Amino acid sequence: MNRIPALALATLIAFAPLASFAGAPKPAACAPTVRNAWVRMTPMMPMGAGYFVLENRCKAAVTMSSASSPRFGDVSMHETREENGMSRMRPLARVDVAPGASVEFKPGGRHLMLMSPKGEIAAGSRMRVDLKLADGRTLPVDFDVRSATP
Ligand SMILES: [Cu+2]
């Protein structure tokens, strides 16, 4: 086996990532947007639910894979469904949003389940929830905390 081409190939592989950094800066990746973000704490219970609209105006589909918040010990994605006349919640592992589409988290449907609040989550305040995308990006979102009784 001729060692010189192998060495040249190894060198090429080693420096290929550097070469791409040296090129023109890439335009910022298109990111989905979030609107109507709000939280409702459950009366008398240390938990709440988060609602929002996730809109994807990008050319590629995006997948939301999880969420977290500095104000809660545990945040998960849930969906409420009617089954045999009973309202049941089930965990959602992922939420896909097609290009040009939007997905709504709303009362009676998809929601963020907010558990183990750290201190009081007061109506009228705002709190941050970080939405995590499957591609590794994080969308920090300010949620309005609304009164449990409308
Ligand atoms: Cu839930």
Image (cartoon, rainbow, N blue to C red):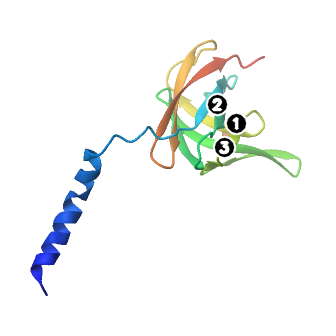
Q: Secondary structure at mark 3?
A: strand
Please say if the residues under marks 3 and 1 sit with CB atoms less than 8 Å apart. no
Callout 3 amino acid? His
Q: CA distance from mark 3 to mark 2?
A: 10 Å
Please say if the residues under marks 2 and 1 sit with CB atoms less than 8 Å apart. yes
112 or 148, which lies in front? 112
At which x and y percent is residue 57? 62, 39
Q: Which residue corresponds to mark 3?
A: 78
Mark 3 residue CB less than 8 A from any atom of ligand 1: yes
Q: Residue at x 68, y 18 (%)?
A: 146
At which x and y percent is residue 33? 59, 33
Callout 2 amino acid? Gly
Q: Which residue corresponds to mark 1?
A: 105
Counting the numbered discs, the total is: 3
Sequence-wise first label, 3 or 1: 3
Which of discs 3 and 1 lies nearer the camera? The answer is 1
The residue most toward the top is 124
Callout 1 amino acid? Phe
Q: CA distance from mark 2 to mark 1?
A: 8 Å
